[in-house]
Amino acid sequence: MESIISEKVQVGISACMYGCEVRYNKKGWDMLTYFGREREAFIWHPMCPECMSGLGVPRDAIRITGGNGFDVWNGKARVKTSRGEDITEKVKNGARICMETLKNAGVYVYVFMEGSPSCGVYRTTLKNKRIGKPPGVFGALLLNEGFFLIPAADMQSPVRRWDWRRRLHAFVWLKNMELDSTVKLYDMWHIIKFLCQEIDNEQAKTIGREIAGIKGFDEEFAQDIKNRILMILRRPSSLERIKHMLWKNYSFYKKKAGVEVEGIMEPTGLRNMTHIAKELMDMEVRTYKEGTFFGSAPIIYRRV
Ligand code: SF4
């Protein structure tokens, strides 16, 4: 089974994180500068739900009163400007337009701006202070539609960036796969299981047991397995788990290939994030070139 993606992955992104100065106060940041040349490996779809609501730039800051984005869609909360004007319907409309645009373009990945009453998704912290009341109005739609979600702040950390990129590629690879035979199901699991074990070992063990116990092909069962794996892949790993899996993979590689790779350190070895990201990339490139398997990043993007 092919474990390479040759199409650029399409990614939606809050426009203010793409460098567009569309925030209420005319600000915007280009978070993709942290990518360097790697930004070319994706097709970006900048969206600004508040601009699409017809609110313009600059505009009054907005907030949700009486709940979060889900409550707005349920009619239990309202969206108001800092001057008290009720703009609920406008904001819902802007969010709908953005979602429709993404869906029409076949996009199911989104980089969101934390804390926004529109684009915010998760509760995150900034300088030990909780920001926003997530999800926002558009964030609620992203969650309902099962998007692969990436906090924009993750762009700044080389290890977090590496983590979401390899999970994203695995996610897209599996999402586009038609699991129509037992052999395909076995092959898929063989490729993806190490990454799933790293993110959620308990769930991965259960899925592994269920796949091993298959008597005959069952389409519903295959779809259920696929959905559960996609759910696992949406969740970030941790630095500790990443370092342990890197070392495990490397030890296996060293034994098999009979060569050592300079710079790969044990999980307890002290080094900064940039160094860890370099170790991960080195292993990724090396295993790809040699045609061996790197379980931590099983699916690779390469332009053919
Ligand atoms: S609506 Fe979203 S994209 Fe627009 S400024 Fe706010 S956070 Fe940024």
Image (cartoon, rainbow, N blue to C red):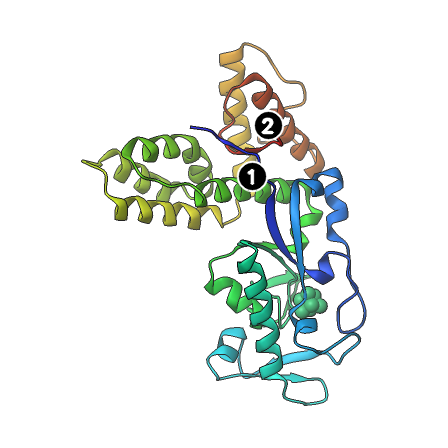
Residue at 61% x, 41% y is: 8
Q: Is the residue under label 2 in contact with that under label 1 (CB below 8 Å)?
A: yes
| Crowding at mark 1 (Cα within 10 Å: few <14, some 14-19, many 20+) | some
| Crowding at mark 2 (Cα within 10 Å: few <14, some 14-19, many 20+) | many
In the rendered image of this protein, does residue 240 appear above or below residue 3?
A: below
In the rendered image of this protein, does residue 30 appear above or below residue 188?
A: below
The answer to which quarter of the image holds residue 303 is: top right
**What whole-number distance in Å separates the C-alpha atoms at marks 1 and 2?**
10 Å
Residue at 54% x, 40% y is: 169
Ligand 1 quarter of the rendering: bottom right
Q: Is mark 2 within 8 Å of ligand 1?
A: no
Q: Which mark is residue 288?
A: none
Q: Earlier in the sequence, mark 1 or mark 2?
A: 1
Give percent across and percent down for residue 237: 52, 44
Give percent across and percent down for residue 9: 59, 44
Residue where numbered disc 2 is placed: 284
Could you say which is closer to the camera, residue 294 or residue 144? 144
In the rendered image of this protein, does residue 159 appear above or below residue 12?
A: above
Amino acid tagged 2? Glu
Residue where numbered disc 1 is placed: 166
